[in-house]
Image (tube, grey):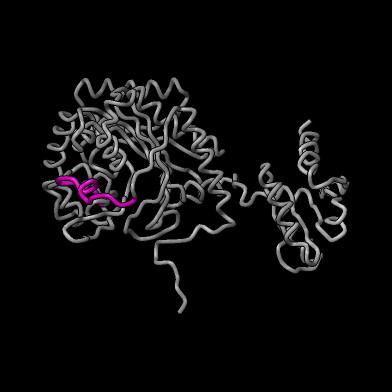
Amino acid sequence: MAYQTMRGFYDILPDKTEAWLQMESLIRTMCTLYDYAEIRTPIVEDTKVFKRENDSSDMVNKEMYSFTMGKDNYTLRPEGTAGVIRSFVEHKFYGSMELPAKLYYIGPMFRHERPQKGRQRQFNQFGVENIGLMSPLADAECIALGYSILKAFGLKSIKVLINTLGDDESRANYRAALKEHFAAHLDDLCEDCRRRYEQNPLRILDCKVDHEKACVQEAPKLLDYLNEDSRQYFEQVLKMLETLGIPYEIDDKLVRGLDYYTHTVFEVVSLHEDSGSQSTIFGGGRYDHLVEYFGGPSLSGVGFAIGLERLMMLIEAEGHPLSEEKSLDVYVMSLQGCQAKALELATILRSHGYKCEANLQPRSMKSQFKTVDRKKARYMIVAGEDEIANNSYTIKDLTTKQEYPTTMEEMVTVLDGLIEGEEI
């Protein structure tokens, strides 16, 4: 019986993993520059970590992979923020870490939704959380980190969309205005939006089904319901983005997909023609009450998340593909019966940091030369009976075709000298 991956799940094969490693390495480097530390939370959490009271988001209501073992309810993590905040509170980072705590994560997430280009049911996500500082400057710095990462990959066709949900008072006034507005249009809304009307009418503005309908397009604007504190906060975020040279566009219907956001929300979208309906590269925002929900003190946070499959797709679409396979430094050929010595030579080279492969099976020289070409080896060494008996080997530079005699003991020194000569 032939087995295949389930719908919405896929393998990242060896010919692609080098590109993934390079992408993750650059992301980690950028996080280090911004003084973020990596955190790794479990893939499985208590369902209540994600399913909070009266949550109206599609992720919680329709997309989570949840299951029961005995009396316990578990969920495969659909997003990263909740698990990070749970860990932050559980380990009392608010007392042991200097605030703001700046954390990032990379790992698989799971959502049961219709698979499409750039969106799978198991997907890889990178995200950051800046916890403990309520400041427009922290919001701007968070956006700047994400924007800088995209620029580091060479992406140019991108745009920052930003909005504010205001503080608790502003959102309460706006919710009341939306409920009054949509009360006369409930029959025109989809089933999900009728549920959102009762739970959180802001979510109606984010509906993929109803977003073009007149009642949604004519809905009150949140900016008209901001109190003065919220208005000034948002203006300071925008001013800082301008200072940092980050272009933006205010999108008054941007509310993001999760209920815990307050104040600043943002998305960075691709304008490239190949991005299609999956134009959002990353998104996030500020949250004021999530730390308290998990039993911690009253601390605010801000963060964002990037779907790495979508990012990889856009990097390739804009013509900046990452290297798919790193070439070999050295290939050690072996003649009949000399495979053990070839392995010994390769092990010595590997212990000194050389990426090396050795032929460990009976193969013709012609076949081994094909492997050398396919692996794009820089140097080659042959292990045969005469070489072993005389402890006399030859390092061949496969670019210049020059040969350099050596012994097993001097092999690394000779290679080091050749590499240093290239660098000079």
Quarter of the image where one finds residue 418? top right
- 121 vs 106: above or below: below
Does the magenta portion include 356? no
**On the picture, is 303 further left or further right than 49?**
right
Does the magenta portion include 57? yes
Residue 76: image location, x then y, percent? 30, 54
Residue 349: image location, x then y, percent? 71, 46
Q: Residue at x 25, y 35 (%)?
A: 89
Q: Magenta residues, as a range?
A: 43-58
Residue 195: image location, x then y, percent? 15, 52
- Residues 158 and 223: in front is 158
Residue sticking out furthest to the front: 389
**On the picture, is 32 further left or further right than 357?**
left
Count of all numbered marks drawn on residues in the image: 0
- Residues 229 and 186: in front is 229
- 296 vs 75: above or below: above
Quarter of the image where one finds residue 339? bottom right
- Residues 266 and 63: in front is 63
**On the picture, is 338 further left or further right than 165?**
right
Q: Residue at x 40, y 26 (%)?
A: 141
Residue 160: image location, x then y, percent? 41, 35
- Residues 324 and 282: in front is 324
Quadrant location of the N terminus in the rendered image: bottom left
Quadrant location of the C terminus in the rendered image: top right
